[in-house]
Structure formats: structure tokens, C-alpha cells
Image (cartoon, rainbow, N blue to C red):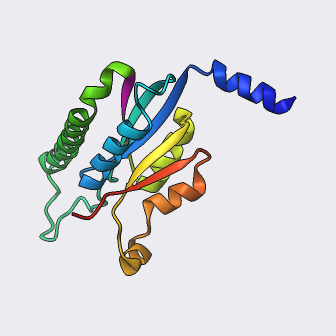
Amino acid sequence: MGSLMEEEVEKLRKEKRIVVAVDESEESMYALSWCLTNLVSDANKTKSTLILLYVKPPPPLYNSLDAAGYLFANDVVGAMEKYGWDLVNSVMARAEAVYKDFSSIMSVEKKVGTGDAKDVICGAVEKLGADILVMGSHDYGFFKRALLGSVSDHCAKHVKCPVVVVKRPRD
């Protein structure tokens, strides 16, 4: 009896919420393209909302005095913030070029977070009520992954929805 009720709830569900983590890399744009081709399509009768999530790195910690003992100028801080937003706009424009042919069959939301990518992504997935998380893989080797950690590994262990990690084929 319980499984029949769960099936009915799934049928009543009108919208699938798919979060795709995007960044400056070709791997993330490939993951977005893969998601559109394999998870969002005309054949899929479920209305989908694609949520593009970009995570800005946290602002650098700096002393208000530079090495020479001068105050760090506000225009330098402002320039760094502007650069961060220019990067966000550039990534979102690249993503829009990838999803534009699919925009008639889905709605798109763009979200920007700031902080450690793995923590921001996990928090956003929960807050946004994602049904699935799609991420690209940078395919780091063992030592680099051990040193830097893997955002996709962390997310796969900590989010409550399915996670699809898409590897870009080697050329």
C-alpha cells in the first residue's frame, strides 16, 4: 500500500528541480550539456527547472596594511569584487549559450553563492529542494585530489539527492 501512494505522489509531482554546478571550466559546461541531453528532453514529460549554481571563492583574507605599511586602498577591494562579478556574468553567459536551445521546455534559475564550493553546493542543494545534482569532474589524479580534496566526492557523500558526476571524454 505504501509504494502505491509513493507512485501517486510522483505522478502528481509537476516539476523536477535539477541543480547544475557551473564554473569557468570546460568540464562544467560539458556536464551542463550532458544534463540537458540526458535529463531534460522533450521525451521527458516532467516539467524541469534547471538551477545553475556558481560559487564565488571567499574574499581573500588580507591585512588592511600592505607590506610597505600602507593602507589597502578601497579601490583595490572594489576592483577585486568587480572582477568576481565579471567572472560570474561570464560563466552564466557561457551556460546560457549551452542551454538556449532547451529553454522552451524548462525554466532556468541562476544562483550565486560565496564560500567554500563543497559547503555552498551542499547547502544550496538542500535549500533549493533539488531532485538531482549534476557536476563536472576535473579528473584530478590521486595526489592532487588528496591535496585539494574533491568537491564532487564531498557532495556525493553529503547531499540527500542523487548526484551525477559527469566526466568529459578525453580528446
Residue 137, by quadrant, is bottom left
Residue 25 visible to the viewer: no
The residue that appears at 17% across and 44% down in the rendered structure is 78
The residue that appears at 49% across and 53% down in the rendered structure is 119
Range of the magenta residues? 106-112
Q: Where is residue 46 shown, x and y percent of the image?
A: 51, 23
The residue that appears at 54% across and 56% down in the rendered structure is 156
Q: Which residue lies furthest to the bottom in this view?
A: 143
Q: Where is residue 145 shown, x and y percent of the image?
A: 40, 73
Above or below residue 123? Residue 1 is above
Residue 43 visible to the viewer: yes
Magenta stretch, overall SS: strand
Q: Where is residue 63 shown, x and y percent of the image?
A: 27, 62
- Reply yes or no: does residue 171 show up in magenta: no
- Reply yes or no: does residue 107 show up in magenta: yes
Front residue (pair 37, 89): 37
Q: Where is residue 11 shown, x and y percent of the image?
A: 65, 22
Residue 157, by quadrant, is bottom right
Above or below residue 56? Residue 70 is below
In the image, taking residue 17 as reference, residue 158 lies left or right, namely right
Q: Residue furthest front?
A: 43
In the image, taking residue 129 as reference, residue 149 lies left or right, namely left
For the N terminus, give its image quadrant. Answer: top right
Front residue (pair 146, 138): 138
Above or below residue 100? Residue 149 is below
Residue 10, by quadrant, is top right
For the C terminus, give its image quadrant. Answer: bottom left
The residue that appears at 30% across and 60% down in the rendered structure is 169
